Amino acid sequence: MSAATRKTAVVIGAGPGLGLSVAHRFGREGYAVALVSRSDARHARYVASLAAAGVEAAAFVADVRDHDRALAALDAIVERFGTIDVLYYGPGAADLDAAPLPPITGITSEDVREAMEVVYPTVALVGKVLPRMVERGEGGLLFAGGLSAVMPMPALGSLAISSAALRNYALTLNAALADQGVYAGSLIIGGLIERGDIHAHVMSRPELFGDAGIRTLDPDAIADTAWDLYAKRDRPEATFSAF
């Protein structure tokens, strides 16, 4: 595919689980892939995996909580590939060893503010890419969020609030963009995603998590659905639950 006709998918929060599966799924459809994550420690492996599958890919380092650097990464991607046609937003937990958040009955406004730190960048990133998508009359925005957005899960505390905010943003974008050629969709995920960092962390600590790792989700199946949502545009979201 020539540079003039090639499309590019950006994976924000590229990791060994769902992020890489989404990259491969869009790559199979002929998309070039730009991977973005906080560290470049595993980028060479990811790019090699995609190259072996015949997918053109490049990796970029940025933490979504650093707005300036995240936006600069998008500029670098456009410089490298020409356009951003699909933006997938699915950053994982910043600190796997962080203390559990208090349940919903014990949260503070500061807890909510901290949980929303993964939502605020979404608006900035969308604001960066959306105008050109609308101008071209095509494009896609996909957001991965938690099951607490649609199901009461008191133990997740402030994460339930941020998950609901991300979902509502995606669905409202979907409604606003329906007649402009740009799709927005929400992936609601409840359960450990196989091959992902959180799954590996849970499986490595059986003394803390017990059999929690048994209830898992296949990242390739979720990525297939992500593609279907974008390609068919017949629904604004899909829910995956291992519970």
Image (tube, rainbow, N blue to C red):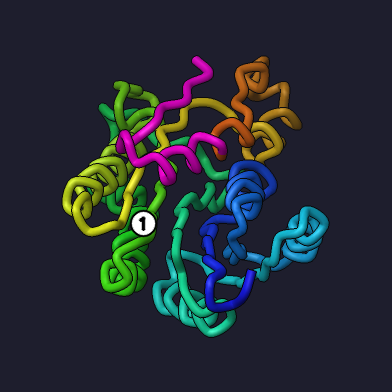
Which residue is situated farthest in the bottom direction here? 79
Quarter location, residue 96: top right
Residue positioned 32% across, 35% down in the render:
234
Residue found 65% across the figure and 69% down from its top: 59
Residue range highlighted in magenta: 224-243
Q: Does the magenta stretch include residue 204?
A: no
Front residue of 28/84: it is 28
In terms of image quadrants, where is residue 42? bottom right
Residue with the mark numbered 1: 117
Taking depth in this image into account, of 18 and 51 the one nearest to the observer is 51
Residue at the image position 36 percent from the left and 63 percent from the top:
121
Is 84 above or below relative to 48?
below
Which amino acid is tagged 1?
Answer: Glu
CA neighbours of label 1 inside 10 A, class few (<14), some (14 to 19), many (20+): few
> Residue 226, percent across and down?
48, 40
Magenta-drawn stretch contains 238? yes
- Say whether residue 180 is left or right of residue 195: left
> Residue 109 in the image: x percent, y percent?
23, 47
Camera-side residue: 70 or 78?
Answer: 78
- 33 versus 170 height, above or below: below
Q: Which residue is drawn at 39% across and 30% down?
A: 238
User: Which quadrant does the N terminus fall into?
Assistant: bottom right
Question: Residue 208: x and y, percent?
Answer: 65, 24
Residue 156 relative to residue 58: left or right: left
Assign a secondary structure to mark 1. Answer: helix
